[in-house]
Image (spheres, rainbow, N blue to C red):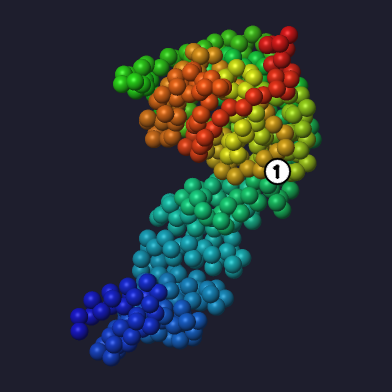
Amino acid sequence: MDMSKSIQSAFEQYQSGNLEQAENIAGGILKADPDNSEALHLLGLISYQHGNHVLALKYIRKALKSDPKNADAYYDMGNILQDKGELAKAITNYKKTLKIRPEYAEAYNNMGIALHDNMQLDKAIKSYQEALRIDPDYAETHNNIGVAFQEKRLLEEAITHFQKALLLKPEYANAYHNLVEAVEGKGHKERYGDPEGIIYAIYRCSYGEDFIQESIKSINDYVDRIFIFWDDKPAGNVTKCRYKGEDVRLPRKFDNVITKIRELDNHKIELIYDHWEAVDNQLTHFVNDIILSKYERPSVVLFLEVTHVFRNEQIQKALVEFKEKGYVFATTGQVEVWKGLGHRLPERPNKAGTILCNLMKLERLPETLKHGGVLVMPKLSAHVHNFSFALSEKIMYWKHLMSLAVSQKFGDYSPPEEWYEEKWLGWDFKSNNENLQITEQDKNLQAIPYDEDELPEVIKAKYFP
């Protein structure tokens, strides 16, 4: 009998769910070699699958007597003991596993679960962190450590890890549920006082002269400070774009947005130059590294695009509802105004509007990814008008090329190269309104007529005086 081939065959049968065949092969191996550690180990696993914990442990102990260096056997013994509720013994076996095989991510993860269940939360977190050091893409560990941080009321860390779990496994239902609970702040009271209800607005811009003044005016009476972080270089320091077979150099200055901001002469505005090369977590950087270190701590932060403009009753509604619901993060709905002011896009379910963050429940801002929020956010009943598809032809052109350039560097999705000319510049409601695809998910997207009376007051004052 070729023992190595027989063992391999037995484990293959076991992994395929053919327990009877695996058991028969392992039994045959033991007849020829009664002390074969791998066959004993496998019979232990088969007994465990049959629900016979006592027999499973008996076989695995025999396997370890035959081969005391069998790290997998210690690991599986730990799993069985943990399933039986014998947490201290399980932890002991995980430690024995790691003494033999120090870089065993699964052992650190499962030991973390046992420590967690044994009310040793800080030790559990350290064990999870070791698992992630070994395997940063271990989705289950990101979820587990997120739960541990949530129990310690460290919501910012919890949210970050739940998001990482979902990015690695988008269908991970448990991580999704945990993230929803975290961003809704369930079971968590404010950690920081809110004596005055300080509210900050944050913009990031490299262009925006068309609507920046109207955007600021629409929120000015409801916020205490307005931080505008501007940059003259796109993410990744891209300087050119491959467009129509040629390299097109991007300008350092897209428009006169900074001049437009300064024209307001608004004492609430803090205009700050800041370059952030990455495409992710720019807003995390603004809040944690700049605002929280240099300014009075706010209770609520609004993240706006330079094309976001509120109606008066909608900004009030958003702030009141956000506070009453006690959310950590939330987003408004949005009306995306299409080319001109008489049409809009139907609301896109996965598109975030203005994002609100409750810093009374967070020490620092968690990761805010590319879109400035978290993966899962409750949507408020209030909405903002977004004029990002109603820009001037010049700015729309450079916005399109900048999007192409960044996507070419980082591999992100962007509209097709011909989108600007064919779908936007050449758009006509009656003859060219089919499939205005903007993102990968937008199928058969069409603009629809919009009542201009519903536009924000500051927009109507500017365009329909």
Foreground: 136 or 339? Answer: 339
Foreground: 309 or 35? Answer: 309
Is residue 273 rendered to the left or right of residue 414? right
- Residue at left offset 63%, top offset 43%: 377
Foreground: 23 or 339? Answer: 339
Q: Quadrant of the N terminus?
A: bottom left
Percent of width and height locating residue 348? 59, 36
Percent of width and height locating residue 302? 66, 31
User: Is disc 1 surrounded by few (<14), some (14 to 19) or many (20+) residues within 10 Å?
Assistant: many
Q: Which residue is mark 1?
A: 327
Compared to 378, does 308 lie above or below? above
- Residue at left offset 46%, top offset 50%: 168
Report the amino acid beneath label 1.
Tyr
Percent of width and height locating residue 119? 61, 65
Compared to 64, does 443 lie above or below? above
Percent of width and height locating residue 433? 53, 26
Q: Secondary structure at mark 1?
A: loop
